[in-house]
Image (tube, grey):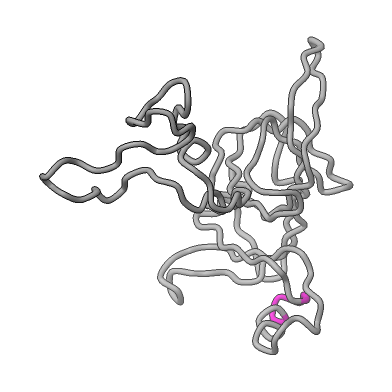
Amino acid sequence: MSGLIGKKIGMTSIFDENGKNIPCTVIEAGPCVVTQVRTNEVDGYEALQLGFDDKAEKHSVKAEEGHFKKAGTVAKKKVVEFKYFVDKYNLGDVLTVDLFNEGEYVDVQGVSKGKGFQGVVKRHGFGGVGQATHGQHNRLRAPGSVGASSYPSRVFKGMRMAGRTGGDNVTVQNLVVLKVVADKNLLVVKGAVPGHKNSYVIIQK
């Protein structure tokens, strides 16, 4: 799986040749530096470790600096391994947004927006008042009945309840690359990708 590390810039929309308005997300993809090459002989598997987004020297430890110095670069904020990279690269090589072409499909992985502690209506899509699902009578957005009767006299594991929502690893598959702006390292993909603005995302094809 070839790919890059990027940063979500935000959302916008563009018009296609038929005048249809298409919502899209702008991602700053790369440049990424090859900071380590995993091999079967040494590591037992093949992968490329890429680093993205320079880290200030005062925020990096000596071990980090030594690791990135081998690749001839400064410490990076985000480091990700990509297994089964299609092309061969060497330590210190720089990968840019040119890795992608307009019209091809990519998968984008990121951490979804954290929403804090939420009830069952927002977290799991329960009906709430009006639809009166899950046994509630007149208590608006309450979850209603959650347990069984005298047997088994407990609540089963996995019962959908209120709780902390968001902040999960989410992958959105098969997003079309609408535009590649090579001089600004920008990738425009159709639709939404997980995460807030300036959050890191992993783009794979």
Residue at (54%, 44%) from the top-left corner? 171
Along the viewing direction, whichever of 82 and 10 lies nearer the viewer: 10
Q: Is residue 183 above or below residue 189?
A: below
The residue positioned farthest toward the top in the image shown = 18
Q: Which residues are magenta?
A: 69-74
The answer to whether residue 158 of the structure is visible from this angle is: yes
Along the viewing direction, whichever of 178 and 160 lies nearer the viewer: 160
Residue at (19%, 41%) from the top-left corner? 148
Q: How many marks?
A: 0
Q: Quadrant of residue 31?
A: bottom right
From the viewer's perspective, is 155 left or right of 183? left
From the viewer's perspective, is 153 left or right of 27? left
The residue positioned farthest toward the left in the image shown = 151
Q: In which quadrant of the rendered image does the C terminus lie?
A: top right
Q: Is residue 2 above or below residue 53?
A: above
Q: Position of residue 204 (x, y in %)?
A: 59, 46
Q: Is residue 190 magenta?
A: no
Residue at (13%, 47%) from the top-left corner? 152
